[in-house]
Image: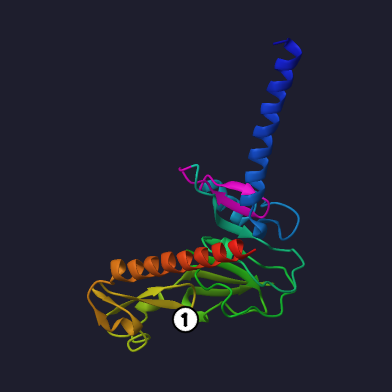
């Protein structure tokens, strides 16, 4: 083998590695981090939070890298302040964020379910004309300073006295699910509609029947297709 061909092979291997790496990066890139230009600034509250958490800045996001390389990085902070956003429709990619800044944007209103599932959210900055999601009762502190409304310390709505005494059915537990939201999950040995069925969920029976049905349908389709091929 000549030196020229070796160099070509090496270059080809490097090119393949580069394409695989770049393609993987593109597939895992979070769109919410690039809703507007710029990056998280070190002098801001979110920038300082990111630095203290040893986070990784990617566009408008502060990411925390998981120890297992097979798992994607996740958002712990999102700074979309001063982005000229008139509306915000979906932030689910940042549902793990502890801090979000949407201040200094001409936003008129926000969907009530926008922050559903944001159980880690402890600080939210909004334009002064907007109310904190879930209302003031969902936060330890709500304060308007200048053009910004500060929502601090998300409360566990399940612990509010008397608030959910009748909302979760019997044999279930309440769990917070974002500011102003909660979800009910069945306790051990209960399942089904409103957790009324007692006993372990029949996994083997259900999935066994489903698997058998799938195999049977597949066989019938195969036999049908074979007959069509023979008739042709």
Please state if 27 lies on the left or on the right of 8 as rendered. left
Is residue 146 visible in the rendered image? The answer is: no
40 or 146, which lies in front?
40
Furthest toward the bottom, the residue is 166
Asked if residue 75 lies in the magenta stretch, the reply is no
Q: Residue at x 70, y 31 (%)?
A: 15
Q: Residue at x 64, y 50 (%)?
A: 27
- Residue beneath disc 1: 137
Q: Which secondary structure lies at badge 1?
A: helix
> On the rendered image, what quadrant is the C terminus found in?
bottom right
Please state if 103 lies on the left or on the right of 143 as rendered. right
Q: Residue at x 39, y 65 (%)?
A: 211
Q: Where residue 184 sits in the image (x, y, percent)? A: 37, 78
Q: Residue at x 50, y 65 (%)?
A: 223
Is residue 13 visible in the rendered image? The answer is: yes
The region drawn magenta spans 53-68
- Quarter of the image for residue 182 reads bottom left
39 or 15, which lies in front?
15
228 or 164, which lies in front?
228
- Quarter of the image for residue 12 reads top right
Asked if residue 62 lies in the magenta stretch, the reply is yes
Please state if 43 lies on the left or on the right of 177 as rendered. right
Q: Residues within 10 Å of mark 1 (few under 14, many from 20)?
A: some
Q: Where residue 46 sits in the image (x, y, percent)? A: 59, 56
Q: Where residue 80 sits in the image (x, y, percent)? A: 68, 62
Furthest toward the front, the residue is 231
């Amino acid at each position: 083998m000549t030196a020229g061909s070796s160099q070509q092979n090496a270059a080809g291997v490097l090119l393949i590695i580069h394409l695989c790496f770049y393609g993987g990066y593109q597939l895992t890139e979070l769109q919410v981090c690039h809703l507007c230009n710029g990056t998280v600034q070190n002098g801001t509250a979110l920038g300082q939070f990111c630095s203290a958490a040893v986070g990784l800045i990617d566009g408008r996001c502060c990411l925390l890298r998981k120890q297992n390389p097979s798992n994607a990085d996740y958002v712990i902070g999102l700074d979309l302040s001063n982005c000229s956003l008139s509306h915000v429709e979906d932030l689910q990619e940042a549902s793990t964020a502890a801090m979000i800044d949407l201040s200094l944007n001409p936003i008129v209103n926000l969907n009530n379910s926008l922050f559903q599932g944001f159980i880690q959210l402890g600080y939210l900055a909004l334009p002064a004309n907007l109310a904190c999601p879930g209302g003031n009762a969902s936060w330890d502190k709500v304060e308007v300073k200048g053009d910004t409304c500060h929502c601090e310390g998300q409360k566990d709505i399940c612990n509010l006295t008397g608030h959910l005494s009748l909302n979760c059915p019997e044999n279930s537990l309440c769990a917070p699910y974002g500011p102003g939201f909660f979800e009910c999950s069945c306790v051990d040995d209960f399942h089904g509609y409103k957790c009324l069925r007692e006993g372990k969920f029949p996994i083997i029976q259900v999935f066994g029947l489903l698997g058998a049905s799938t195999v049977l349908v597949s066989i019938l389709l195969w036999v049908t297709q074979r007959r069509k091929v023979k008739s042709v």
